[in-house]
Amino acid sequence: MREIHITDKEKKQRLDKFLLKYMNKAPKSFIYKMLRKKNIKLNGRRAEGSEILDTGDSIRLFLSEATILSFTEERTVKKTERCFDIVYEDENILLCNKPAGVIVHSDISNKDNTLNDSILYYLYSKGEYDTDAAFTPSICNRLDRNTSGMITAGKNLAALQELNRIFRERLADKYYITVVKGVISKEGAVEGYIIKRDDNTVSITDNKGEGSYILTKYRPLADNGEYTLLEVKLETGRSHQIRVSMKHIGHPVIGDTKYGDIGVNRYFRDKYGLKSQFLHSFRLVFKAEEGALSYLYNREFICPVGHRNAFMIETLFNYKIS
């Protein structure tokens, strides 16, 4: 028999979800079978799995140590060089600046040197990530590989759950900086329905039944007669949303190899060394008045665009940006 005592780091999650993290190789069917057979008890009583854990709760596993070990894969942390700058950090959250070219999570073709690996090793090195605990810090929003800027991560369960709620309920304003082809003289919006294609591209239609709803708002900051510096606000969050929205209105993002202009891309690659789209998650404003992160209400965080991009913007538009 093994007894587990719940701490502040594990509280406020369902018992079944905790067990699936604790015995991370066990199938759901095994967990629920053990609950039904009373081989797993919460505070000495039969449990169903839907109970919300609190600090001080006791979970007893009436299983052999060999069984527990067979369903437990040791968590390890990859030694990964830090690839991000810190925008803001406290005991609950981490806001970091992801460079273009860095992938957020591993996939079939990219297993190593991800932003997630880098964040976990950073927290592990500071003693803020315990691989023996059931909770693993996690990133809460995604950016395309070649999009740079603000990434948020929860350092404990309560913060992670709250960040996920904030983004799900749109209680944070997310702003991007980009440069597009052509002149946009007034603010506007792109509204429609996004359709995914087999070649990993998307398009926008006005037909409601054909895709997922999007709303992209934009505001010009400066132009030079050929290109426009835009601030873009995402009201919805879909893959490639900003890039396809700008193409949809005839103003593709510079450097965008999927939706952009080949000649424009070549010019910016040769003159400024721009090898991918210039799209940067620049500003984040929290709007949650209640909850575990309410102390961040109305706080604004700015994610610098970097020296090279700042130089490009100043050269093109005589406009200074962080």
Image (cartoon, rainbow, N blue to C red):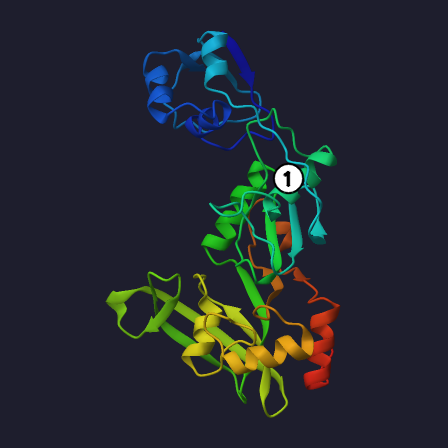
Q: Residue furthest bottom?
A: 225
Percent of width and height locating residue 35: 36, 17
Residue name at image x 72 percent, y 73 percent: 310
For residue 2, side relative to residue 318 (left or right): left
For residue 246, side relative to residue 290 (left or right): left
Percent of width and height locating residue 291: 55, 46
Dot 1 corresponds to which residue?
A: 120
Residue 267 visible within the image: yes
Question: Residue 262 versus residue 250: which sits nearer the camera?
Answer: 262
Q: Which class describes the residues within 10 Å of circle 1: few (<14), some (14-19), or many (20+)?
A: many
Residue 293 visible within the image: no
In this rendering, is residue 32 above or below 222?
above
In this rendering, is residue 321 above or below 78?
below
For residue 36, side relative to residue 159 (left or right): left
Q: Amino acid at mark 1?
A: Leu
Question: Residue 182 versus residue 59: which sits nearer the camera?
Answer: 182
In this rendering, is residue 127 above or below 208?
above
Residue name at image x 45 percent, y 55 percent: 169
Percent of width and height locating residue 284: 61, 62
